[in-house]
Amino acid sequence: MTAHSHGKTRFASAPWSQPAPLSFEPEVSLDDIRTLAAEAGFVVAAVTTADPYPGLRAMLEGHIDAGHLTGLDWFDHARAEVAADPRALHDNARSIVSLGIPYFSGPAEKPDDVPRGRISRYAWGIDYHRVFRKRLQLFLSLLEVLVGRPVESRLLSDTARTVDRAAAVRSGLGWYGKHSCVIVPGHGSWVMLGEAFVDVAIEKSAPLDRDCGSCSRCLDRCPTGAIVAPYIVDAPRCLSFQTIEQRGAIPREIRPLLGDWVFGCDVCQEVCPYTGAAAIVDDPDFSPRSEENRFPRLEWLLRMSEEEFRAVYAGTAVLRTKRRGLARNAAVAMGNAGDRAVVPILVEALRAHDEPLVRGHAAWALGRLDGQTSRSALDRALRAESDADVQEEIRAALLTT
């Protein structure tokens, strides 16, 4: 999982970040682990025990019960129970190595005046799951050479019922910011996180005694107010959830707040003083192959075929939102841009897009771009449209034009 979040669970203040009892004599030093991690392509590494996280289960269940995870139905009480105890995933685990890959490549601006959307920085390059799998396997092979035996392991990065950030915080890799992202010294929250659960006794690192002080920029600047309190994010309001995990219609009250984000949202990271001072790194795995991988043209997103979508975004995290979701988001971004030059493109999408979800959001966008062309197109579409949900979107849009 990333040090930030993209519509996934975020966590409150951290009793599980306190030092866990060191119940063994280490057979591998922390310095050795950090050397191996660097050889495997990890910039930061820290170690904690595989003991349970005190209080984590109750906190996760509290978030579930409060509705903060509505829409993430896979994150249930059973998952919270397992997540709170690392040995539920690897019963012979003696240590957890928390590993991180920074990915901030410096300030970036749209290249021209063409209407373009924004993709969250973590998704510009290769899907981080793929990157972590390769580097974790290399780390494990190096560790086995060091200890001179096969190592029983579980290698994870947002791929099992664990809490990547809990391990990162308890190990001292970073600390929780008020946006619930893990802030890593020197890199801010622009860091991908993963773990190696291993049956090796490793020297433990210490948690960091740091926090955000009185700063509340992330709460104040969140576009939707999804950070409802320090360390607590209401997933259904988060733009990352709405642009990625949301499979149906984006709630109308949230659409104007989406701005030009078409996949994820980085605002809480961008405004954070710690992440603003992050070191610039050049990791080819997280570099965009083309401009469409970071600032895609909205017109192209609305018109792309399934083949074009898969060709451009193959091997990246953007595939998760699917073609229909990305086109839906592009329609909303067009409506938010306030540029009447996009009206003909939206009219075409309303009339002919093969996905009803996209047609409905194109109708909403036309309703935002008031004018006779928009109203006439909506009137014609209402007479021709057979999908009930799209009809309802058109009627709502006509009330605003």
Image: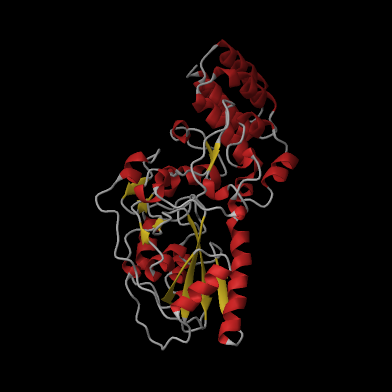
Counting the numbered discs, the total is: 0
Residue 345 place in picture, x, y as percent: 64, 23
* Residue 128 quadrant: bottom right
Residue nearest the observer in this picture, 62 or 326: 326
Residue ID at (55%, 27%): 334
In the displayed structure, would residue 48 be above or below residue 299?
A: below
Closer to the camera in the image, 165 or 25: 25
Question: Which of the two residues, 304 or 61, is positioned nearer the viewer here?
Answer: 304
- Say left or right for 112 vs 277: right
Q: Quadrant of residue 9?
A: bottom left
View extreme (top): residue: 372
Hey, which residue is sitting farthest left in the picture? 214
Q: Quadrant of residue 321?
A: top right
What x and y, as percent, mark residue 146? 57, 83
144 horizontally vs 274: left or right: right
**Which residue is at 51% across, 37% downward?**
250
Tell me which residue sits at (59%, 82%) in the image: 144
Q: Nearer the viewer, residue 99 or 259?
A: 99
Farthest right residue?
307
Tell me, yes or no, if residue 176 can be seen here: yes
